[in-house]
Amino acid sequence: MSSTTEYIVHHLTHNNVLISGKSGGFWSIHMDTFSMSLLLGFVYLFIFTLLARRAKVENPGKLQLFFELILDMVSQQVKDVYSGGKSKVIVPLALTIFCWIFLMNLMDLLPVDLINFSNNMIGTPGAKWRAVPSADVNATFAMSLSVLILIIGYGIKAKGLGHWLYELISAPFGIYALPINLIFQLLELVTKPISLSLRLFGNMYAGELIFILIALLPWHSQWLLGVPWAIFHILIITLQAFIFMVLTIVYLSMATQKH
């Protein structure tokens, strides 16, 4: 790269494929985000399917014990937080959210110039590719919108469509304050996916940017600053996946509660 600015812009630019319209418009897709998310989703499914088929009651392996620990942690969180009664979906959903987002966040630990090196090796120098799907606000917002659909669906399932609509216009101030109630309820519905998506995106984007800035330093300074930041970033990676999972459970639990 000819300058620091071009280096940073290159690493923060998505591989954008047009569907229609102008470059970077609404009808386009970030192939790097889509491909990495899909790949990591299959990685998660492959690992858990393999472990489920090879699970042993006697003398389980270390990998099986590790994933059983994760499953117990997720199950305990659902048991402590979710108050909507028994559900066959909540635990698998929470487990998928935690593991999938963790894998996406984990891509932030890949060397910054690994993609450029790979592109040079295969003869496509200068090609743009961001490896961290959760550092793309489109991906985090899409996941949060899925959670919003589940919130509405679980609310209707638990209360019935009529009662859910009635609460939408009557809570929290009573039916006579219908306009105010409706505004408050819609604001609550809208802020949930926005807060979910921006919290995850902001933390991962900031982490990615710091790694890029460290990569601009001399090589001896990169190790001096990069290794401690990578170790600390493992905590952020795990914590952000955990927070997204717990808030999803909390929101689904709130959706099933009657005012």
Image (cartoon, rainbow, N blue to C red):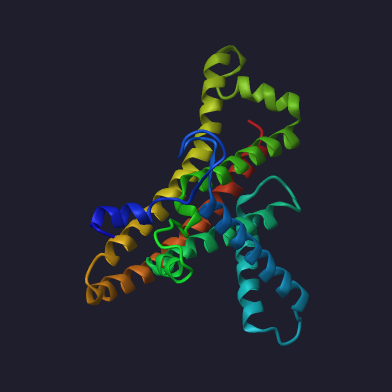
What residue is shown at x 40% (from left), y 49% (from top)? 202
The x and y percentages for residue 93 are 67, 54
**Viewer-nearest residue: 116 or 222:** 116
The x and y percentages for residue 151 are 64, 39
Q: Which quadrant of the structure image shows residue 97?
A: bottom right
What is the quadrant of the C terminus in the image?
Answer: top right
User: Can residue 252 be seen in the rendering of this structure?
Assistant: yes
Q: Which quadrant of the structure image shows residue 175?
A: top right
What residue is shown at x 29% (from left), y 53% (from top)? 6
**Viewer-nearest residue: 182 or 15:** 15
For residue 199, above or below residue 126: above
What residue is shown at x 44% (from left), y 47% (from top)? 199
**Viewer-nearest residue: 104 or 193:** 104
Q: Is residue 214 left or right of residue 82?
A: left
The x and y percentages for residue 35 are 57, 56
User: Can residue 238 be seen in the rendering of this structure?
Assistant: no
Q: Which quadrant of the structure image shows residue 257?
A: top right
For residue 16, above or below residue 192: below
The x and y percentages for residue 95 are 64, 59
**Viewer-nearest residue: 236 or 78:** 236
Farthest top residue? 176
Give the number of callouts: 0
Q: Is residue 189 left or right of residue 87?
A: left
What is the quadrant of the N terminus in the image?
Answer: bottom left
Farthest bottom residue? 59
For residue 65, above or below residue 123: below
